[in-house]
């Protein structure tokens, strides 16, 4: 008998996904919000198509990947089977990958500099295809982390809207690991409100319930569904 059979792994993923959905519904209710106002992005980076399938079988249709190349390797085949699935790019984008990213993804959460915004705008016009776009804000002002600095966020969003005619859906952040995420979620939520943006991509496995309390419209949950990476 083997304890790590494909079936056991599939059951684990199905069970954890159901648990995350329950917790999202409870957190939304506690915040007096509709559960449907929170989109669950199942972050499947590093996991294979076989590990993704149980989530698809359980009705999950929105997935997140952080690398264009890795996503290209596993999603085109799954898309043929599940044409209604939506793919979100949640990792940093290089401008030489903009064409591939626009072709493969339905949303990009990591618009954070003029060069990327311009490359994505040009590709969307060329293909043509419209993606849901989020501006990543480096709320912790961490030098090694991607995202526009908080002080530059308003001017950057204005540039995207005015110069590039981009329809920005919202803001995204990844709080510093050692800090209280609520402070960052509150900050991002206020900034989005000031900019008239409805979308808030925030909250991961460890803090998505807190993010929902602060208005998250998109939570990006990986390990709580698929297990440790
Ligand atoms: C990996 C990743 C996640 C998911 O992280 P978990 O802690 O596994 O839920 C969310 N957002 C981004 C940007 C990621 O890279």
Image (tube, rainbow, N blue to C red):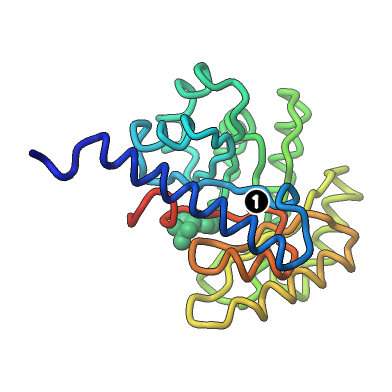
Residue 54 picture quarter:
top left
- Picture coordinates of residue 10 (x, y %)? 33, 38
Count of all numbered marks drawn on residues in the image: 1
Q: Residue at x 79, y 49 (%)?
A: 169
Question: In the image, what residue occupies the spot 58% across and 44% down?
Answer: 89
> Does any atom of ligand 1 lie closer than 8 Å to the CB of label 1?
yes
Q: Where in the figure is residue 60, as x and y percent of width and height?
A: 54, 37
Kind of element beneath mark 1:
strand
Q: Which residue is more in the foreground, 214 or 199?
A: 214
Q: Is residue 28 left or right of residue 57?
A: right
Whether 213 is drawn above or below 71: the answer is below
Nearer the observer, 117 or 106: 106
Q: On the rendered structure, is 34 left or right of 27?
A: right
Question: Which quadrant: the C terminus?
Answer: bottom left
Camera-side residue: 218 or 12? 12
Q: Identify the residue shown where x is 81% and y is 49%.
A: 168
Q: Name which quarter of the figure residue 214 lies in.
A: bottom right
Q: In the image, is 4 to the left or to the right of 110? A: left
Q: Nearer the viewer, residue 65 or 124?
A: 65
Residue 66 visible, this angle: no
Q: In the displayed structure, would residue 17 be above or below residue 82?
A: below
Q: Residue at x 46, y 30 (%)?
A: 57
The answer to whether residue 209 is seen in the rendering is: yes
Residue for badge 1: 109
């Amino acid at each position: 008998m083997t304890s790590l059979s494909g079936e056991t792994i599939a059951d684990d993923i199905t069970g954890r996904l159901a648990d995350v959905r329950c917790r999202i519904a409870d957190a939304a209710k506690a915040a007096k919000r509709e559960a449907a106002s929170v989109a669950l992005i199942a972050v499947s980076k590093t996991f294979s198509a076989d590990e993704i399938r149980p989530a698809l079988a359980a009705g999950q249709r929105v997935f997140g990947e952080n690398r264009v190349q890795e996503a290209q390797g596993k999603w085109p085949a799954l898309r043929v089977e599940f044409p209604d699935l939506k793919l979100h790019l949640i990792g940093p984008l290089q401008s030489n990958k903009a064409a591939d990213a626009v072709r493969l993804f339905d949303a990009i959460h990591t618009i954070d500099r003029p060069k990327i915004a311009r490359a994505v705008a040009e590709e969307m016009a060329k293909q043509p295809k419209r993606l849901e776009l989020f501006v990543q804000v480096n709320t912790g002002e961490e030098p090694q982390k991607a995202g526009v600095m908080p002080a530059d966020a308003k001017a950057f969003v204005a540039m995207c809207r005015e110069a590039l005619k981009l329809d920005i859906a919202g803001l995204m952040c990844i709080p510093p690991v050692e800090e209280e995420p609520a402070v960052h979620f509150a900050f991002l939520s206020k900034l989005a409100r000031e900019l008239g943006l409805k979308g808030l991509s925030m909250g991961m496995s460890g803090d998505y319930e807190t993010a929902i309390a602060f208005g998250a419209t998109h939570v990006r949950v990986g390990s709580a569904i698929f297990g440790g990476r």
